[in-house]
Image (cartoon, coloured by chain):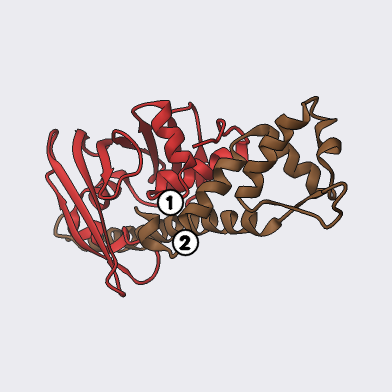
Amino acid sequence: MTSPGSLKVATPSDREIVMTRVFDAPRTLVWEALTTPALLKRWLLGPPGWTMTTCEMDLRVGGAYRYQWRKDDGTVMGMGGILREVVAPERLTATERFDQSWYPGEGLVSQVLTEADGQTTITMTLRYESKEARDMVVKSGASTGMEMGYARLAELLAGTLADGRK
Amino acid sequence: MQLRGYGRLAPDRLDAVFAALADPTRRAILTRLAAGEASVTELAEPFAMTQPAVSKHLKVLERAGLVSRGQDAQRRPRRLEPRPLAEATQWLERYRKIWEGNFQRLDTLLDELKSTRKKSPHTKR
């Protein structure tokens, strides 16, 4: 059994990256925290010094979302996309594109919530439109995005990176 | 979440490091060099590769700053430069920390929501 707090990363296929994390709360609450802008603004911040200045989500299939962060030195970054699946409190899938995107197409992020014994597991799957896009994501050191960091970390640990010439 | 925005990193350098690491032969060369410096001839042997092929890989590794050339003009031994590798690892580690930070804040928020809900009108007597 997985205990709350430990973050796991896996690469089940060449187009996907999966992260799992257990939370000590029922999934209705976790769902709320993942889909309510006022709550998202309290935890989805990144490193110290950053605040979430914009958090909008039209919580329905086809609805848009938009996130923007600002650092205390004035640096701004943003991202957004369209919600593809909204099944409360089980599944949230959305496209993802960063304002300064570095790979072709969009990422697709799905968050699946499962509950057991009052604890909720979030399984976050990041999927790219093509192997090429993911490889660019994996190769790009200027990368942004959590998928990036984790893709690369997982790949490096597994020692399975594709040939790396840009 | 955008790492470029988060950290003052050297993206081009990281690009080169990760691209260099993306090939199994180049990782094997690095592993070999971790045991001590070696000439191109010495490196070609265990990999059953031609010297030009090894040189090509070495060029990628050198461009990434992962490998440098020793003083001996005759052998031109290559040696491992551990620093860029450490930088790349730190970069990834920083990323993991960012998400651990996010999720820890989420833990705190969920605890707060749980206790609030206990006091909500639904469960009040």
Residue depicted at x 73% and y 34%:
B54
What is the drawing colour of chain B?
A: brown
Q: Chain of mark 2?
A: B
Dot 2 alpha-carbon crowd within 10 angstroms: few under 14, some 14 to 19, many 20 or more: some
Q: Chain of mark 1?
A: A
Q: Do the numbered discs 2 and 1 sit on residues whose CB atoms are within 8 Å?
A: yes
Residue depicted at x 24% and y 37%:
A94
Instruction: Please indicate, yes or no, whether residue B57 appears anywhere in the rendered image.
Output: yes
- Does dot 2 land on a helix, a strand or a loop? loop
**Amino acid type for the residue under numbered disc 1:** Ala
Whether residue A15 sits left or right of residue B92 in the image: it is: left
Give the number of the disc on residue B9: 2
**Amino acid type for the residue under numbered disc 2:** Leu
**Quadrant, the N terminus of chain A:** top right
Observer-nearest of A91 and A163: A163
Whether residue A1 sits left or right of residue A131 in the image: it is: right
Measured as percent of width and height from the top left, residue A6 is found at: 51, 50
